[in-house]
Image: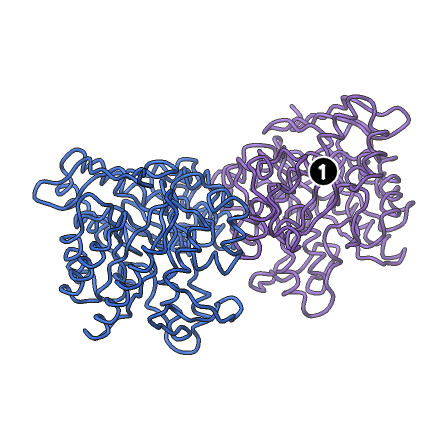
Chain colours: A blue, B purple
Amino acid sequence: MKAPIRFQVLADTPGGKARQGLLETPHGAVETPAFMAVGTQATVKTLDPEEIRATGCQIVLANAYHLELRPGAERIARLGGLHRFMGWDGPLLTDSGGYQLFSLAPLARIRDEGIEFQSHLDGTRMCLTPESVIEIQEALGPDIAMVLDEPLGFPHTREEAEDSLRRTTDWAQRAKEAHRRADQAIFGIVQGGAFEDLRSRSAEEIVGIDFHGYAVGGLCLGEGKRDTEELLGAVTDVLPAEKPRYVMGMGTPSDLIRGVSHGADLFDCVMPTRHARRGNLFTWGGRLSIKNARHAEDPSPIDPDCACPTCRRGFSRAYLRHLFQAGEILGQRLMTMHNLFFYQDTLRRAREALRAGNFSAWAEVALAGPLGRDPEGPPCGGDPPPPQGREVFAEFRRVIE
Amino acid sequence: MKAPIRFQVLADTPGGKARQGLLETPHGAVETPAFMAVGTQATVKTLDPEEIRATGCQIVLANAYHLELRPGAERIARLGGLHRFMGWDGPLLTDSGGYQLFSLAPLARIRDEGIEFQSHLDGTRMCLTPESVIEIQEALGPDIAMVLDEPLGFPHTREEAEDSLRRTTDWAQRAKEAHRRADQAIFGIVQGGAFEDLRSRSAEEIVGIDFHGYAVGGLCLGEGKRDTEELLGAVTDVLPAEKPRYVMGMGTPSDLIRGVSHGADLFDCVMPTRHARRGNLFTWGGRLSIKNARHAEDPSPIDPDCACPTCRRGFSRAYLRHLFQAGEILGQRLMTMHNLFFYQDTLRRAREALRAGNFSAWAEVALAGPLGRDPEGPPCGGDPPPPQGREVFAEFRRVIE
């Protein structure tokens, strides 16, 4: 039977793990390393499909949990599947929603059977199992489905990490057995918490089940950037070279570059889109906040070195600041375009360097510049640590991407 | 000296007042009758300039009062003027903000000198005079500037209407004398309240001052559709045929058709954009609310007979409903595109009928169909009646377009 996806490494790095590849899916090919734009609710916030493409995006990520809650996976299936529903005809991956349930932890009960929880929309009691998560994704019909895993908060004990590892392997096995769609790839997820040996063991167990690709989950949750790198390295040492590797929820542009150097092929993060809506912009000269009064009469684009539609069409910092201050949606759109383009551009440059065989030198220069000077923020710059306590509903609503 | 605008009537209606014309401005020509998209804060809400163009829009309206408050007219002038600031290189008209001040009436004091008021943004005490309103618009640099007028609430006494008429004429004279920019047209505004003879007298006085075009203000504020038509007719009977006529704040698609039959050339209204953001859509089969559960699994476009980008690209009612329910901005954008296109399409069809010499028959058929069956709503379907009492700040913020 024909494999749903095909992955080739086209260029690798002598003495290093970074590689440039080609991931072929039923809806087109993705040059890796690649950043997946986050389209949780079947829309990359503020953008239409043509604009998503114009950012340089090759593959979009949606969320099975969110779409099952609203409008319902079966409904989307009856409407012809997720690609057709959202008007995106390129490669599409859905996350299971494990991380979203993790964010809801105080309301969710994790059992070996699955995760019992209350809908964040209306409080309905529901249960997600490894099997039901596959069923939902088979109905949605993305090119790549993710297994249900159990992420772990930070900090945690070794015992908790072992527990999560065991359950994640068990669930991965059940997901593999439940998966039927021959035109859909399924990726396993490696857990193991903040312990390198457990990360290695988890990777071995998940690889043993045999998936079309492998993801690394539970990183960037508070463990510090150096630890993230070591844990990621421990996993990619084990993962087979011939399968694509996806680091979930990572990160800042410099995190992406470090991830690539550890052999990662796919990334996703809400950072570029969420930051854009808050007026925080990435440039090759460093980050800026459009709210800053110094932009009020600045006729220049966000970044003179940027070829994104917002910068190229001459929308000035002064105008973007005005739109932001006035609460106008166009500002959110134009800034989202820019930030997503910036992320894509970062990995486009990384791919070029990999093809040219000078990735290590390129990465060193890039990380020594403004890109490497990430302002202080949440680890990997992604989601804030999951909320604790009774305000979880409100908090979770706030962070939905 | 070359006139800033040129207007020609290309086709008129035997035995009627409807006409098809061409309005040439420094930034391009407008085929009339034409609907101006409302871009109060230097953006047509949710759309970028290319999309504004794609709706069929030929001329955009912005608001001098809003832009003076934020980001400031002098600032926009230093940035190269309003066209450049907002990236719209087509014809542009600014309203003075008289109507916005009217909405703020409980906080504004109208004197012969001008209008004293508090900024709705920060409460700062300010004064707009006929001269300062021209100064602001000369700084902004639209192709067409509007004089400051004094609209009147509804109901009102004959004495109040006479008072408003007198002041409006006086202010128009002062605005004319203050206006300097030779590359900018200036339009007078006719008031006169709900009294036909006062409407005629106001029109005579304003025409006597001699402007590049004439607007009819203070309609659609509660007087009922039949009265609107009679008052408009009384004014267009007086206005010179060779100058463009603009009916301010009107209305539903059927209002536009009735306005055209009374000889109006230009229209503006927040209705298509505001309704779109609330999920209320215009179609050739009548209005619909995307919130309605019957759309939840409907794979068809908003209107199969519509050629707008939203309908043409196949975004389904089901998807639009999902985006609306999920609070996603893309839904507001796609529905705004559709409604604005519908308005433009209505007047494009009217222009075709006028050129073909069968406008009256076309209008009769159009008004007898779903287009003529406006659901009950505020008069002319535009703004709700101005708020009364102390909640005016909150209410006004809510209705800003």
What subunit carries mark 1? B
The single residue placed furthest to the left in the displayed view is A15
Residue A5 is drawn in which quadrant? top left
Residue closest to the eye, A374 or A360: A360
Q: Quadrant of the N terminus of chain B?
A: top right
For image coordinates 38% across by 74% down, the residue present is A109
Mark 1, residue position: B187
Residue A149 is drawn in which quadrant? bottom left
> In the picture provided, is A187 more to the left or to the right than B255?
left
For image coordinates 65% across by 60% down, the residue present is B396
> In the picture provided, is A100 more to the left or to the right than A218?
right
Residue closest to the eye, A208 or B29: A208
> In the picture provided, is B342 more to the left or to the right than A242?
right
Residue closest to the eye, A136 or A200: A136
Residue closest to the eye, A140 or B167: A140
Secondary structure found at label 1: strand
Residue A294, how many percent across, how many down? 38, 52
Residue A305 seen from this side? no
Count every numbered label the image shows and give the total.
Answer: 1
Q: Amino acid at mark 1?
A: Phe
Residue A95, how many percent across, how many down? 37, 55
Residue A113, how many percent across, how many down? 36, 69
The single residue placed furthest to the bottom in the displayed view is A390
Residue A375, how many percent across, how many down? 27, 59
When the figure is inspected, residue B263 is found, relative to residue B151, above or below; the finding is above
Q: Label 1 neighbourhood size at 10 Å, few (<14), some (14-19), many (20+)?
A: many
Residue B127 seen from this side? yes
When the figure is inspected, residue A246 is found, relative to residue B339, above or below; the finding is below
